[in-house]
Image (tube, rainbow, N blue to C red):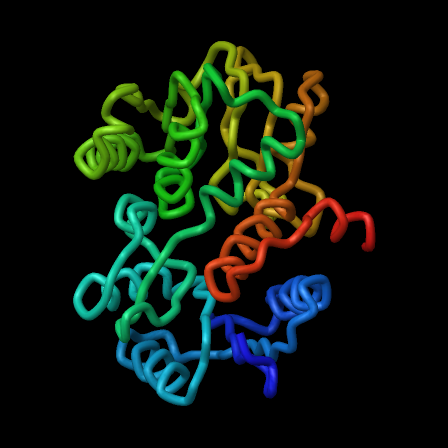
Amino acid sequence: MSQSSPQHFIVIGNPIAHSKSPEIHQQFAKQAQLQIRYNRQYCPDDAASFIDVVEAFFNGGGVGANVTVPFKQVAYQLCAERGQLSTHAQVAGAVNTLMLKEGKIYGDNTDGQGLVNHLLSLGWPLQGAKVAILGAGGASRGVALPLIEAGIKQLTIANRTVEKAQALVQQLGTASPIIDSIQPTYCALEQLEGDFDIIINATSIGLSGDMLPLKDSLNCHYAYDMMYGRELPFLTHFSDKGAEVSPGYGMLIGQAALSFKLWTGTSVDLNALNEAQ
């Protein structure tokens, strides 16, 4: 790509001031020796405003946009109706990465693969693993297919409202024959028990300092919380039970690296990035 002027990128969200994406992508660009401008873009919380922001950005020569809460489903609808979607975005029902492809808006979802790449970098075994995901929202839906593609053997989705977990399992099975092939199960959160290789918290409850209603008979070798930035009760709980634990900052870095590669064609060395911090 020509570097006579910086390439423009944004992250669209509401709220957005807290986003670490500009700093992360500037580090990627420095490593790749690319000139970029990456800005936070606040957007009123309605679909029409989001579409206006996206169209103005790309019409103005923007290269790529990240999408965060609460617009991932709106971005999905935009691409489904007017553009193109990756397989991961189709199954997730959500988009976190936008770019132009063949003149149309293309949407991808790099969250799940970002999670998988972080788990593998931690040395956590996914091949043949028995996995439970806590929560049945968009975060859970976005990571199911990449986890199964990575070789997990069993998947259970547990949610406080069991009907929501049941609906998600049915939606996932319909969306992807790969997911349907391992026949995921579901249950109420407070009924989840037994031994798992990995338990992933895809809820945001830990940010409030509250703890999920988990049975004492629930155990795992590895516990992962998609949240980060503070002490998380979920991780403390399983660490006290002897599990290896990790917050989700590595997932944030991982999904960002995949977005960066989609936009620029350049892979970044996340190990070198971590060492530099």
Location of residue 187 by image quarter: top left
Task: Using the image as rendered, state which of residue 272 and residue 202 is in the foreground.
Answer: 272
Q: Is 102 drawn above or below residue 134 in the view shown?
A: below
**What x and y, as percent, mark residue 3?**
60, 81
User: Which residue does the image show at 33% across and 61% down from the upper left?
Assistant: 107
Depth check, front residue: 84 or 56: 84
Which of the 4 image quadrants contains residue 118?
Answer: top right
Q: Is residue 240 left or right of residue 38?
A: right
Q: Is residue 207 left or right of residue 104?
A: right
Task: Locate residue 134, reporting x and y percent.
Answer: 45, 32
Q: Which residue is found at the position 37% from the left and 74% from the top?
A: 45
Could you say where residue 28 lies in the image, as x and y percent from the top left? 66, 62
- In the displayed orientation, state which residue is furthest to the right: 276
Please tell me how many numbered marks the rendered image carries: 0
- Height in image: 119 above or below 90? above
- Residue at 25% over, 35% down: 172
Residue 230 appears at what percent x and percent y? 70, 48
Relative to residue 60, is residue 270 depicted above or below?
above
Left or right of 238, for residue 104: left
Write the residue at 39% across / 66% down: 98
